[in-house]
Image (cartoon, rainbow, N blue to C red):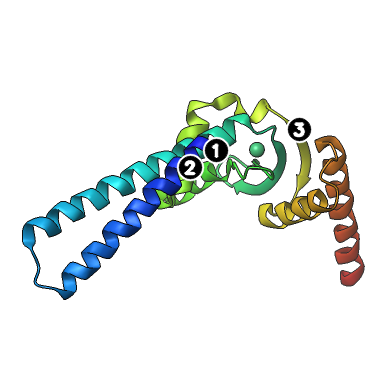
Amino acid sequence: MDNLEQEYLKIKAVLNQKQKEIGQLYNEKVEVQNFFKLQKEVQELQEQMLKIIKAINSQNWSTCKHIWLVTKQSYDPGEGRTYNYCSCLKCGLSYEVFDEYETKGKEALNDLTKAQMFEFLQKHPSARYRGLHSNYYANLEETQNIYRKIKKRNPDLSDEIVLQLIEEQLNKKKGLTRKRKG
Ligand SMILES: [Zn+2]
């Protein structure tokens, strides 16, 4: 992981330098050959960076001891049933990409991370069996925020306890909304 990050930063520094050189060429008399050479180098560096990001994501997703929560429910009127999609609030891996793919088609996967997730989950169908599961239904971003806050205050708490605390908070919130409505 550290190695990958270091490599990423190294490439990024070279990329910045090359982009600066390209910027300078715009201002000077353009040497066409040099310009194309630099552009090609920039493209290659960007591809290398992308590969590293992919490797880092894949490493995170396969080593994370997930905490799964239901983050999306989608009703299929044809089948008359509701599908639950879960996401990990630690690493962000999310089965919601399958719902997006079903409902919006391929364009939904234009987002790089989503496309990677889709590919990863297809390749690793057992990912969902790893870690802890909760039947609670809550927005991913919101729950990730609660998770981060709890971990910041108590970095040593086990996942089990953290999940309990999160469920308690979600319960409290549910109680509050009910009160407000009533
Ligand atoms: Zn995870």
Check disc 1 and report the residue beneath it: 2
Label 2 near label 1: C-beta < 8 Å? yes
Q: Distance between the residues labelled 2 and 3?
A: 32 Å
Check disc 3 and report the residue beneath it: 132
Q: Which of 63 and 92 is in front in this view?
A: 63
Q: Kindly state the secondary structure of the residue where label 2 is placed.
A: helix
Q: Kindly state the secondary structure of the residue where label 1 is placed.
A: helix
Q: Nearer the viewer, residue 139 or 130?
A: 130
Q: Taking 56 as reference, is 146 left or right?
A: right
Q: Residue at x 71, y 39 (%)?
A: 68
Q: Nearer the viewer, residue 9 or 135?
A: 9
Residue 132 in percent (x, y) is at: 76, 32
Q: Taking 103 as reference, is 79 left or right?
A: right
Question: Sequence order check: which comes first, mark 1 or mark 3?
Answer: 1
Q: Kindly state the secondary structure of the residue where label 3 is placed.
A: strand
Number of residue marks: 3
Q: How crowded is mark 1: few (under 14 residues within 10 Å), some or many (20 or more)?
A: few
Whether residue 80 can be seen here? yes
Q: How far apart are marks 1 and 2 (CA)?
A: 6 Å
Q: Distance between the residues labelled 1 and 3?
A: 27 Å
Q: Taking 125 as reference, is 108 left or right?
A: left
Q: In which quarter of the image is residue 127?
A: top right
